[in-house]
Amino acid sequence: MIDLLGYGAFFLSTALIFALITLGLNLQWGLTGLFNVGISGFVAIGAYASAILTTPATPDRIGGFGWPILLGWAAAALLTAAAAAFTGYATLRLKSDYLAITTFGVAVVVQLVALNAQVLTGGPFGVAFIPRPFAAVQADPVLFNFANLAVIAAVTGATFLALQRLSRSPWGRVLRALREDERAAIALGKSARSYRIQAFAVGGAVMGLAGAVQAHFIGFIAPDNYLPTLTFQVWAMLMVGGSGSNRGAVMGAIVVWAIWVGSGSLTSAIVPGDWQARAASLQIVAIGVMLCLILLWRPQGFFGARRRGA
Amino acid sequence: MSQMVLEARNLTKRFGGLAAVDTMSLAAAPGEILGLIGPNGAGKTTMFDLLAGSVSPSGGSIHLMGQDITHAPAHRRLSAGMGRTFQIPRPFPELTLLENMMLARQDQTGERFWANFTAPRRVAAEERAARDKAMALLDLVALSRLARDPARILSGGQRKLLELARVMMADPKVVLLDEPAAGVNPALLEVLIARIQTINATGVTFVLIEHNIDMVTRLCHRIIVMAQGSLLFAGKPDEVARNPRVIEAYLGGAAA
């Protein structure tokens, strides 16, 4: 029973970190219509930034700054915002699929840097000993898990509320107008360039923050955490939840993560040992099948109100 | 400068070797409704795009109320006092009519990211004022009962009315209308003409491109005829209708 509670808290913590990333994507895609397929790259920048700034000194790697965790998170959000703003600036002239290819390229570059820039990132071995919040109570797993869940829920909740306010604000209204018709928005006095960069930066900040929170929750990061699979998962979460809705982004993240974890334990329970590695791909299949079902029955997702392609 | 509210001097736009607009000048007096007509390919649309800022000129200048806006980007022209509508109206389809309207307000505090957290009261007060103004303008074009509906449900003619009301949210001194009558049914066209006259009576200047000659002669105080990128003739509607060169160029002699 205690184990189950602890596991529940762990599951929800992970799901809420995904929810945070999905909220960032919702601002960029759901609100502004920016086709960002480089999510994993922005999450990685946040994770590495906070990890490097807060870990103790290690030979062969830059570090030993010993910043407090909260400061590391803030720096992660700011740094990712800057990286995302630069990406936005560099891709101002690109639309839809071209933008997607470019952002995907950014993510690949970030991942390769993480893998090879050993002095900065520790290379394939990653960064370990990332300080975890409430490390003092680590001996009591239930308390530890719940304390962490509380922090993650607070960060996700605060971000959710801030994004809700922004979506309904005149600022959010400009983003939605740009999504619908950029030329008309310009004729109405809105600088498409400026808002596009802002949307990239704010969404990137949220993704970077999520990466940092996750890094400190697990205590260890490696380049393998930031493969395109992560981007795929987050897109599936937004599609299922409903593009354009912050509520949908959170719900979609929880539902898709439940299916991901559920299909993972199901395959490991019923597939014989030799086949386990290959059966792991069934997780992606499970998400894909669900995505198809959602798109057939409720193309706008659980919470999406928007009728696309009208 | 002059007392002209909008003045274009020797505007030129070359696309490669072709001068679509060739040293064309045009001036609109305050409170005037100025028509811009000409046969297909005369350069009306390019002239219009130059004035609106969506195309930058190869030569010449544009002044708005004495201020040089020749190289001001398109998104700065509305706050400078000049708005435009599109030939095919461009409402934001998934935004409500009210949101479409409120968006057009210029210099909104709440359009700045941080202001939504640092000055929420001011943002809310501005939003209330914008909503009141939007509802009044929607009333004027008989669309207020649809204020909460998404703009995609509107008919073509209603979209034109919404676009006219929307651009008025910014309190422009000059409004450029790109073929306001195109695709509008006769009944709605009467509403549209009446509303343009109502707004014009408050001192707003209009410059319009139009193919519907009946509408142009009824609405416009003065008409400028373009042919091959340059000025062919300018005068009052009845003078234009009688001018042999205009009849030759624009009507191909058929109406003579």
Image: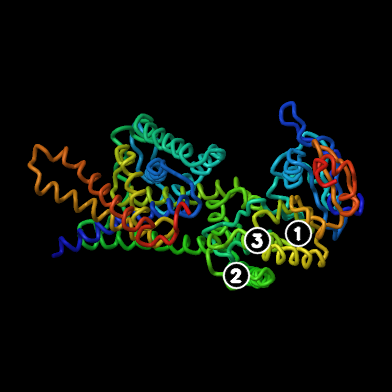
Chain of the residue that carries numbered disc 2 in the rendered image: B
Tell me what residue is drawn at x 41 percent, y 41 percent.
Answer: A38
Mark in front: 1 vs 3: 3
Work out which quarter of the rendered image holds the N terminus of chain A and state it.
bottom left
Of pointers 2 and 3, the one earlier in the residue sequence: 2
Depth check: give the residue in front, B241 or B87. B241
Of pointers 1 and 3, the one earlier in the residue sequence: 1
Q: Residue furthest left?
A: A272
Q: Are marks 1 and 3 in contact (CB under 8 Å)?
A: no
Asked if one can make out residue A65 in the rendered structure from this viewpoint, the answer is: no
Q: Which residue is mark 3?
A: B185
Q: Name the spot of residue A279 as percent of width and height, x first.
A: 16, 41
Q: Are marks 2 and 3 in contact (CB under 8 Å)?
A: no
Circle 3: element type: loop
Q: Are marks 2 and 1 in contact (CB under 8 Å)?
A: no
Mark in front: 2 vs 1: 1
Q: Which residue is mark 2?
A: B124
Q: Which residue is mark 1?
A: B172
Q: Residues within 10 Å of mark 1 (few under 14, many from 20)?
A: some
Q: CA distance from mark 2 to mark 1?
A: 23 Å
The amino acid marked with disc number 3 is: Asn
Of pointers 2 and 1, the one earlier in the residue sequence: 2
Tell me what residue is drawn at x 61 percent, y 67 percent.
Answer: B123
Chain of the residue that carries numbered disc 3 in the rendered image: B
Q: CA distance from mark 1 to mark 3?
A: 27 Å
Circle 1: element type: loop
